[in-house]
Image: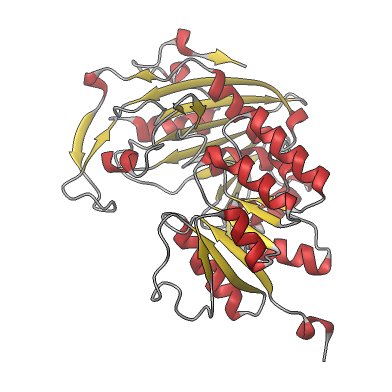
Amino acid sequence: MSAAAARQPLPVVLVGARGHGRWHLANLRRLTGAGLVRLAGVCDLTPLTAAELDGFGPVAQSDDFETLLAVTEARVAVLCTPIPTHADLALTAARHGVHLLVEKPPAPSYAEFRRMADGLAEAGVACTIGFQSLGSHALPAVRALLADGVIGEPTGIGAAGAWVRDEAYFRRAPWAGHRRLDGTDVLDGVLTNPLAHAVATALALAGSTAAEDVARVETELFRAHAIESDDTSCVRVTTGNGSRVTVAATLCAETAGEPYAVVHGSRGRITFWYKQDRVLVQRDGHAPEETVHGRTDLLENLVAHLTDGTPLLVPPPATGAFMHVLEAVRSAPDPVALPPDAWHTAPGTGTTDARNSLRRVVPGIDGLVAASADTLSLYSELGAPWALPQEVRSG
């Protein structure tokens, strides 16, 4: 029998099994079938039903994380809980020598991120941050194209995310749509949570993922919905080597689109639709070339790291630059409410649990998001009448 065949599946505890936790439960089911893991426990305020756990075998359940770790003797914990809880839960796991996958964003402030990352490093436990797009094989493929000079000298990277969310989305949890709750940072804004992948992916394409890679962050934060946080925003990051990275995002699009990042070059451009692992190369003197790439699942990568020593794809230091962007958003003035004539209501998408939900639409925002990625400009620089230059904040 080979060493691989003789390995026992790693016992895993899932913390937070509702909402996005359902995706992790399905992924654990897949990895269980592959013999890589065993779901040993679920930590949630509402226990999963027998039907939801069908096929997993015996699974311990408790709303007490530390007790569950002791009972299950877990090797790995998957944290899919409210953003402000990540650091404390991760450090609890570290005290038990339990390795981690922590959902993005890893923390609601740079200070909390450092507290978590430093504590995990001191404890000697492995951790990966759940930016699933950073497991795409398209990223090294694009980097290879850039190294080969396929589009000439890179001149900047722009990312765009135009999504649609119903008003009910901002009532999905007590912390939804908040910057702070009961004095605690939350940062549930468009750039820091739903479209955080756009920020992290753009920075990865720029080769600027570490905290020290960020020299300056400019922010423009707005909201059409009656929330505390931002739903229509953009940032421009200047890296230590002078590169520019912009990200424009909204949850108030007229039509939902696939988010993407585009690398501009002196002789062409490379567009990466990161949810689809799809890459389009457009360059002078050549026909467009499109490729679709594979993806390494981050929990599978963590298991391989623990069993074979495979390098982690998204360890905490690889999200330092993203956390600097989050910190700039956190420390910026509160998002500006768009004037009533800058948005209108429309029927909801029906994707929320609430019936007859409405959504808010910012006319023209789809084009502004795309134009930002094309020109590396902020909304105010594109002439959006509701984006006043004085709302630009540098950090």
Provide residue 266's location: percent of width, then percent of height: 67, 34
Q: Nearer the viewer, residue 391 or 7?
A: 7
Determine the residue located farthest toward the left in the rendered image: 356
Provide residue 52's location: percent of width, then percent of height: 41, 72
Report the residue at 73% width, 40% height from top.
117
Report the residue at 27% width, 34% height from top.
361
Provide residue 143's location: percent of width, then percent of height: 73, 48
Q: Is residue 392 visible?
A: yes
* The quarter of the displayed image where residue 292 is located: bottom right
Locate the N terminus and report the quarter of the image it occupies: bottom right
Locate the C terminus and report the quarter of the image it occupies: top right
Relative to 378, does residue 140 appear above or below in the rendering? below
| Left or right, residue 188 beside residue 157 | left
* The quarter of the displayed image where residue 76 is located: bottom right
Report the residue at 77% width, 26% height from top.
241
Provide residue 192's location: percent of width, then percent of height: 52, 35
Q: Nearer the viewer, residue 104 or 378?
A: 104
Report the residue at 67% width, 59% height from top.
137
Relative to 282, does residue 158 appear above or below in the rendering? above
Determine the residue located farthest toward the bottom in the rendered image: 1
Q: Nearer the viewer, residue 261 or 179?
A: 179
Q: Is residue 317 visible?
A: no
| Left or right, residue 242 beside residue 20 | right
For the image, the number of numbered tags is: 0
Specify the color scheme.
secondary structure
